[in-house]
Image (tube, grey):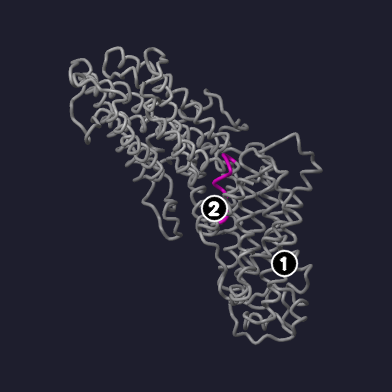
Amino acid sequence: MNVCHDFRHAKYTIPVAILLTILLSPFKTSVDNYKITYLLIIAVTSTVPWDSYLLRNEVWTYPEHAVIGTTFWKIPVEELFFFVVQTYITSLICIIVGKSIIPAAYLPTLPITPPSPSIEEAKPRKRKHLIQNDYKRLLRIGLFGAIFTASLVVIGVRLAHNGGRGTYMGLILVWACPVILLLWCLSHQYILSIPAKNVLVPIILPTVYLWFVDTLALKNGTWVINPEKSSGVKLWEYLDIEEALFFLVTNILITFGQLSFDHTLAVITGFPETFDFAIPSWPPFFLMARGLSFPVKSYPSRRILNLRDAIVKLQNKSRSFSLASSVFEGRLRIDLVLLYAFCRNADDLIDEADTPEEARKALTKLSEAVATTFSQYRSSTNNTSNDGVNLKPPISMLYNLPEEMASSLEMLPIDVIPLKPIQGLLEGFGMDLQFPLIGNKTKNYTVDDKFPIETEQDLKRYGYCVAGTVAELLLHLVFHHSPTKDITKKKRDEIIQAGANMGIALQYINISRDIAKDALMGRCYIPSDWLAEYNLTPPMVVEKPDRHGVRMLRRRLLGTAMEIYYKNRGAIERLPTHCGARKGVRGAVENYVEIGRVLLERDDGMPIGNEATVSKARRFWVFVKALCA
């Protein structure tokens, strides 16, 4: 017996499966396990009858010496094993590629909606065509795809019915194409909306690999295709066109199946006003079916478009958090992105004002809008509009806020987060407006000009306002979406306090990196009493940031940041694991702290004014290590 051919693809496919499992393990979530398990069950139960029919009708055969002998419905156990491995490998590739996107942002919207920024290009001034045109294009392509697939079913029926050399081809088309047609009709708009790589890579990559693997199996005689049932056409030597088609359509089936799961999960997690209950890690089948059948006309278009805007903002402004967000799951990930967009838009609203007076007016408008929004939302007994979006005041009309700022405020999950940290954040922006002059270093400062960061306590207060509050808000979202009985209210408050301290540490790192950048805006966040120890003043730092004393103080600031970090990082391990909360927070923190480590490494040779950047490779490695910790 030639046992080297046992499990005909195992020696090629098992190592790939193991490698992909190792690569994905830091990122894999309970929802990913759910999707893979369901798809494995469907793949095996749907393929066994069909493959058994092929064997009974001698469409393909195998020599007895090439298998171990155990069969099920005449199917060798090696073949059953291969069904599982192929489904598993393709599913893993699909999941890995899909980690970069938030599926809810790619759901189709109604034709009447306004334009939205392009997520893929992620450039502020890049805009898509009107959604109306996209919507019609999706419908046209969807109809063409349905007609084309249905035509293949008809062709398959005729080939299988006629028998002879077209039998194998016909049986493949009859078996696979109806399922592909069903999945296409249910999810074609989502499949066409997501980046092309998310669809093509999981199909093409394993297909080409399995073509070569199967070529070796056929060459070695592990199994044989009946020449009387096949066309005789070969893609290349030893690989029949039917076999090439089989691997292509099966990988299309697996990929479309995974994307259909993503589609329905995007609906039930992306529309909390409609699906107003906690989504379990393993959603029941009826809930998945409900999400998949939810009509597009009922999708809350405004929410989808605002989520797209928030993602563009995240991709442009924070590489660290953008990477970390891929670990968070479901509604937690969406709410964190919406929170980030609000904080960033509020910061930009103040920093990008033409004059300090305009910045102060904008801050006043935003503060009033925030207070009114929280008050009216929480006092309302009916908070849902017809399109499933929270019924909140028309912020942009009431307070004349920029559209992007108004949208991010309207989509802020205020039913989950407290008002006090938001007010603290706005207080921090107000401290920025206390600097004598913004964006002009030519001013002749006088002794009467006061910089707001006079003492270390001022610095700590500022760090809490602009970063500690954001950490508090993030943790409130974590505990809302990841409830656990293991954490008492006292422990929860302790963790939130540790999170606020961690936010202060990260802000110190941010200040250390941006000393020269802040100086260009007329700002110096190094405490005045620290500067006095080196006979320096804030105006001197604004005029010339790259001074010896400033370098020493930057090192001191970084040392303080790292001390706070080491003191509070243990609280991360007390966070719940549900929704990827612990991994995501750990990954985000470690990525940002790495900036501080780079600054310390280069402190002697890098002049102030050269911002420390962490290479993509190093950032990714730090992130992976954090997830595996």
In terms of image quadrants, where is residue 452?
bottom right
User: Local crowd at mark 2 within 10 Å, few (<14), some, or many (≥20)?
Assistant: some
In this picture, residue 414 sits left or right of residue 207? right
561, above or below 128, in the image: below
The segment highlighted magenta reads 320-331
Q: Would residue 621 be visible to someone looking at this image?
A: yes
Q: Nearer the viewer, mark 2 or mark 1?
A: 1
* Residue occupying image coordinates x 44% and y 59%: 123
- Along the line of sight, the residue nearer the viewer: 192 or 36: 36
Residue that numbered label 2 is attached to: 322
Does label 2 or label 1 sit earlier along the sequence?
2
Query: Is residue 215 highlighted in magenta?
Result: no
Is 553 in front, or is 196? 553
Residue 78: % across, % down: 41, 23
Indicate the secondary structure of the residue bearing disc 1. helix
* Residue 445 x %, y %: 68, 85
Is 60 located above or below residue 338 in the figure? above
- Residue flagged by tag 2: what amino acid is it? Ser
Q: Is residue 323 magenta?
A: yes
Residue drawn at point x = 60 percent, y = 59 percent: 346
Q: Residue at x 44, y 51 (%)?
A: 119
Residue 246 percent coordinates (x, y): 30, 28
Residue closer to the observer: 486 or 12: 12
- Name the residue type under label 1: Gly
Quadrant that contains the N terminus: top left
Distance CA(mark 2)–CA(mark 1):
26 Å
Name the residue beneath numbered marker 1.
Answer: 559
Decide: few, some or many residues near mark 1? Use Cα within 10 Å; few <14, some 14-19, many ≥20: some
Q: Quadrant of residue 190?
A: top left
